[in-house]
Amino acid sequence: MRLLSVAALAAILATAMAKTNNIALMMRLTDLRNAAGEEVLSDVWRGIAMGALLAVKDFNDRNDRFTPALGEAQYASCDVDLAPTMYDTGSNSKGSIMAYREARADQDNGDGTYSLHSILGAARSDASKPMATLGGIDGVPQMSYWSTSDALDDKSVYTYFGRSIPADSATTKAAAELMSNLGYEYVGVAYVDDPYGASWKDAFVAACSAMKCKDEAGNPTEESCPIQVITTGLVGGNQESVEQSVAIFKEADVKIGFIVT
């Protein structure tokens, strides 16, 4: 809830201050990735969507129960309110494009201009990428609370994209440090083969390659001690693909690793 509140606050700060800010809440309510068709997601995801609505309400009420900044004087005197509309990204790039087009059409002024002021979301990096590309072209600020792909840092493509969560390069560096501190020199990574999983894998491999040896006190030295990483991509929700990844790990004698799904 706090993460959503911070993201909503960042979204309003990133855009031109229209007194009524039309914000599109890009939520993950269904999954369009599976060949069988649309899958309605669990109550957990609907709960996250409700959290976004509560975050908007807190901003409009200047309620600082989750975001202390809302209790500061600058927000007490702010005359901007958020007008939310929720859209379903379908958990993938196709669904996010459809959601963005719908949000823009809903704010069509009929004279060649649009009143879509900001976007909150999407959750998955695979959904945020095309949306951020379109938003960059149209000048619509986007603030994601969950997309962590390092590729989204490319401002030449994703000009108006921001996030309230660290990129994969930060978390993978910590993961590599953990493996090094535990003494592992050979690690496996099975990752869902999409922009999120592939980005995490690439960042982790880079962090492992850059690891330094440690002295007796545990401090890094100048000597290089890279961790070897065995990687295997998998298709989310596909049992055969998962079994193939397990078989690759077994054949490579991997004893410890990460599963990125």
Image: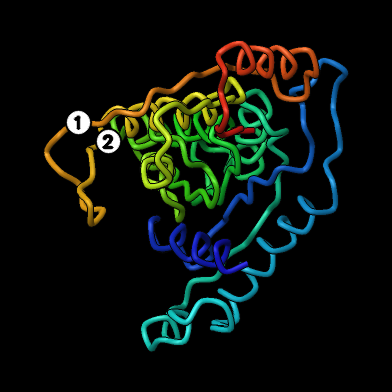
- Amino acid residing under circle 2: Met
Q: In this view, does 260 lie above or below 109?
A: above
SS for callout 1: strand
Observer-nearest residue: 181 or 240? 181
Tell me the tag on residue 211: 2
Tell me the residue at 63%/41% (across/down).
103
Q: Where is residue 109 in the image (x, y as percent from the top left)?
A: 57, 43
Disc 2: CA contacts within 10 A as few (<14), some (14-19) or many (>=20):
many
Tell me the residue at 25%/31% (across/down).
225
Q: In this view, does 224 lie above or below 221?
A: above
Q: Position of residue 197 (x, y in %)?
A: 54, 28
Observer-nearest residue: 102 or 208? 208
Question: Are discs 2 and 1 less than 8 Å apart at CB?
Answer: yes
From mark 2 to mark 1, how far is it between C-alphas? 6 Å
Tell me the residue at 36%/28% (across/down).
227
Q: In which quarter of the image is the C terminus?
A: top right
Q: Where is residue 75 in the image (x, y as percent from the top left)?
A: 43, 81
- Amino acid residing under circle 1: Ser
The quadrant holding residue 238 is top right
Disc 1: CA contacts within 10 A as few (<14), some (14-19) or many (>=20):
few
Residue position marked by numbered label 1 in the rendering:
224
SS for callout 2: loop
Q: Position of residue 260 (x, y in %)?
A: 59, 33
